[in-house]
Image (tube, grey):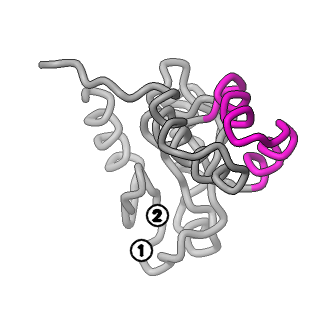
Amino acid sequence: MPKITTPDIDTVLEKYPGEPHYLISLMQDVQSLYNYISPEHLDLICTHVGVPRTRAWSVATFYKSFSLVPRGEHEIKVCLGTACHLKGSPRIVESLERELHVCRGQTTGDLRFTLDTVNCVGACALAPVVVVDEEYQPRTTYRKLNKLLKGLAED
């Protein structure tokens, strides 16, 4: 199977004029490409658009969609809203923490999975809900989730 290559940071920077109002767009593209924004990439972005690093840092830490630490290839978000909580989502989180050897908010050492919890995903009728790579997993049990994760790990 041929190796899939991704564009480098220079290719992303070339897409945008060096103007401050392109800061967020550039950060979004770098986040999408690398799954996080490294300190080196943040510096390159700031230099390109002519803003201080503190401004980019404040943007990156304000918006939840940005990460300044490496994120997993697959993101797992467990809903801890009231309905999901009552239907067992805390046990699902604990099981995932044991299985993946990480705590919520962390990424596995091999950068395959990031485990997070959220307050609500707005699907209470489907509780407990886990979102894996933006795909809702309704009425989740640990057994169903474990099967899904094994399939993702084999990719």
Q: Does the magenta-highlighted stretch encompass residue 50?
A: yes
Numbered disc 1: secondary structure? helix
Q: CA distance from mark 1 to mark 2?
A: 6 Å
Point out the stretch of residues depicted in magenta.
37-62
What residue type is disc 1 on?
Leu
Q: Is residue 104 magenta?
A: no
Most common secondary structure along the magenta stretch? helix
**Can residue 95 be seen in this snapshot?**
no
Picture quadrant of residue 69: top right
Q: Can the viewer see residue 88 in this picture? A: yes
Q: Residue at x 64, y 28 (%)?
A: 41
At x 50%, y 36%, the residue is: 14
Q: Amino acid at mark 2?
A: Val
User: Residue 94 versus residue 150: which sits nearer the camera?
Assistant: 150
- 136 versus 147 height, above or below: below
- Residue 129's tag is 2
Q: Quadrant of the C terminus?
A: top left
Give the labeled residue for mark 1: 126
| 119 left or right, relative to 32 | right
Q: Position of residue 44 (x, y in %)?
A: 67, 28
Q: Quadrant of residue 39?
A: top right
Secondary structure found at label 2: loop
